[in-house]
Amino acid sequence: MVQQPWADLIVENEIAKQVLDKLGYKTSVKELSVPLGAQALSSGQADGYLANWWPSQKSAFEKSLRNSQVEVAGTLMTGTQYAPAVPTSMARELGIRSMADLDKHGDEFGREIIGIEPGTPGNKTIADAIEDDAYGLGDWKLIQSSTEAMLAEVTRRVDRKQPVVFLAWSPHWMTVEWELTFLEDPEDVWPGAGEIRVLVRKGLKQDDPNLYRFLSQIRVDTETAGKWIYTHDKEKKSPEEIACMTFSIATAEVGIARMREALKPGVTENELWSISATRSRTALTRT
């Protein structure tokens, strides 16, 4: 499995790894930049990737998808956002709604856009926009760092009430911590992001139909992903702890649902708990 240092992906990979290991697989996770991850999948050195933000990662995966070296197995999440953003209070104060509004306030922003890890498609899009002088940003610069460093710098500037524009996305706790204005893009410079897809290497469906089916059926809603990110980043829980909590909650929910189904006159409390425990174990094994 391919991974970048993004909290929701780390948790998703950990959950998948725990399930697959219980099924007898020997699962490993490789932390690679998005372009290197695309190469690993297209060359068959990795089997799957649970974080294909689309279409924002189009530049990294378009060729291998077109050549059928990499295949789309499923859609993991819908309703995502990914674009340069400004804290809404600052956006209102400066009258900023669009990327076209940035340059006239260049001095306030220090003519800087704060990005994340080098090599990510989002950074590349910003760098290309600067190089092409899109929206008059030719004299701006991209500050590449890491997700953690970017968020720390945004926190510092927000606390100082200093204008800041940075690469933002949702789901993430940043949209809860700060009300954000995702900037409009009238020139269609930014590819956007509306979904996260599951990618697999060519031939996985034929080589291992069960693994392909498992990966293709993984679904995560934006609320759950946001909770995972908050728990990982803010509460400092490990991916293993979050995976364990997720399994426990899922098992409890199955048990409660089974108990409700079994409720009828004359059923004792002990019989209800017996039904719940048996069926929850069965459901977890099938999962």
Image (cartoon, rainbow, N blue to C red):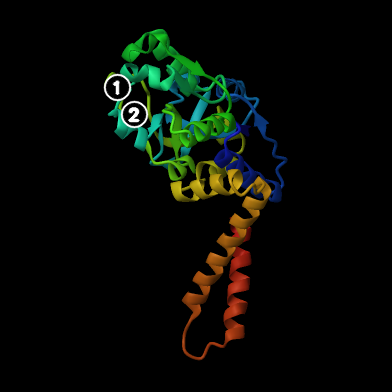
User: What residue is rendered at 57% in x and 39% in y?
Assistant: 9
Mark 2 lies on residue: 183
Q: Is residue 61 visible?
A: no
Do the numbered discs 1 and 2 sit on residues whose CB atoms are within 8 Å? Answer: yes
Q: Is residue 83 depicted above or below 123 in this figure? A: below
Image disc number at residue 31? none
Q: Is residue 268 depicted above or below 248 in this figure? A: below
Nearer-the-camera pick, 245 or 247: 245
User: What residue is rendered at 52% in x and 50% in y?
Assistant: 227
User: What residue is rendered at 45% in x and 21% in y?
Assistant: 113
Q: Amino acid at mark 2?
A: Leu
For numbered disc 1, what is the local secondary structure? helix
Nearer-the-camera pick, 137 or 16: 137
Q: Quadrant of residue 8?
A: top right
Q: Is residue 1 left or right of residue 266?
A: right
Mark 1 vs 2, N-terminal side = 1
Nearer-the-camera pick, 98 or 65: 98
Quadrant showing the N terminus: top right
Q: Is residue 52 left or right of residue 45?
A: left
User: Mark 1 against mark 2, which lies toward the viewer?
Assistant: 1
